[in-house]
């Protein structure tokens, strides 16, 4: 059974664009490399041919995986999300209880996570710890250095 993943419209479109690139740009380029290597003669000792065939296999595996992800993707309707608790697409302002440092993150699907844009995965330790919490709750987040406590200060869209 395949796992259903939730995405923003933007995130799902990014996956579709990546799949389109693999099928229309990368796949023909690899086919061309295979044809060129085949033209060079004996395939049993042709490292170029072997490398191109391996690249083709890896690309086809990536395409199949991405097609599966897209087939099981669901777009999140942001208008029906409850702001009283932390869910996917929540903007959450948290405070590290130990040192008082405040941070703000948006919880997103695994494939949309980008720490530079302050988007963290709901499957990350912090994401898992924050899910379902309300303003004022303390989230215990398991890190390699031990449990870190974060207080939920604000939840918004």
Image (cartoon, rainbow, N blue to C red):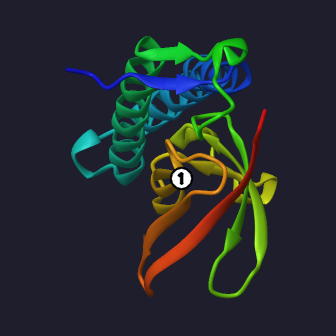
Rendering coords of residue 143 (x, y %): 44, 76
Rendering coords of residue 24 (x, y %): 62, 17
In what quadrant of the picture does the N terminus appear?
Answer: top left
Report the front residue among 135 and 74: 135
Q: Is residue 141 above or below residue 16?
A: below
Report the front residue among 130 and 73: 130
- The residue depicted at 46 percent of the width and 68 percent of the height is 141
Picture quadrant where residue 61 is located: top left
Number of callouts = 1
Q: Is residue 37 above or below residue 99?
A: above
Report the front residue among 129 and 10: 129
Q: Is residue 119 above or below residue 23?
A: below
- The residue depicted at 44 percent of the width and 87 percent of the height is 145
Report the front residue among 136 and 152: 136
- The residue depicted at 39 percent of the width and 48 percent of the height is 51
Q: Is residue 88 above or below residue 142?
A: above
- The residue depicted at 68 percent of the width and 26 percent of the height is 14
Crowding near pointer 1: few (<14 within 10 Å), some, many (20+)? many
Q: Is residue 60 left or right of residue 12?
A: left
Q: Is residue 123 left or right of residue 136?
A: left
Picture quadrant where residue 84 is located: top right
Name the residue furthest front.
Answer: 136
Rendering coords of residue 58 (x, y %): 37, 39
Residue that numbered label 1 is attached to: 130
Q: SS at mark 1?
A: helix
In what quadrant of the picture does the C terminus appear?
Answer: top right
């Amino acid at each position: 059974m395949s796992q259903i993943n939730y995405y923003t419209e933007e995130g799902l479109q990014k996956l579709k664009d990546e799949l389109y690139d693999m099928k229309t740009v990368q796949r023909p380029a690899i086919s061309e490399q295979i044809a060129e290597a085949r033209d060079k003669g004996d395939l049993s000792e042709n490292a170029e041919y072997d490398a191109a065939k391996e690249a083709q296999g890896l690309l086809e595996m990536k395409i199949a995986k991405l097609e599966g992800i897209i087939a099981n993707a669901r777009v999140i309707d942001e208008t029906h999300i409850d702001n009283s608790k932390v869910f996917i697409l929540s903007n959450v302002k948290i405070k590290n209880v130990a040192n008082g440092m405040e941070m703000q993150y948006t919880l997103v699907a695994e494939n949309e996570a980008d720490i530079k844009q302050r988007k963290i995965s709901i499957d990350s330790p912090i994401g898992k710890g924050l899910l379902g919490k309300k303003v004022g709750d303390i989230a215990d987040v398991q890190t390699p250095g031990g449990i870190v406590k974060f207080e939920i200060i604000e939840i918004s869209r």
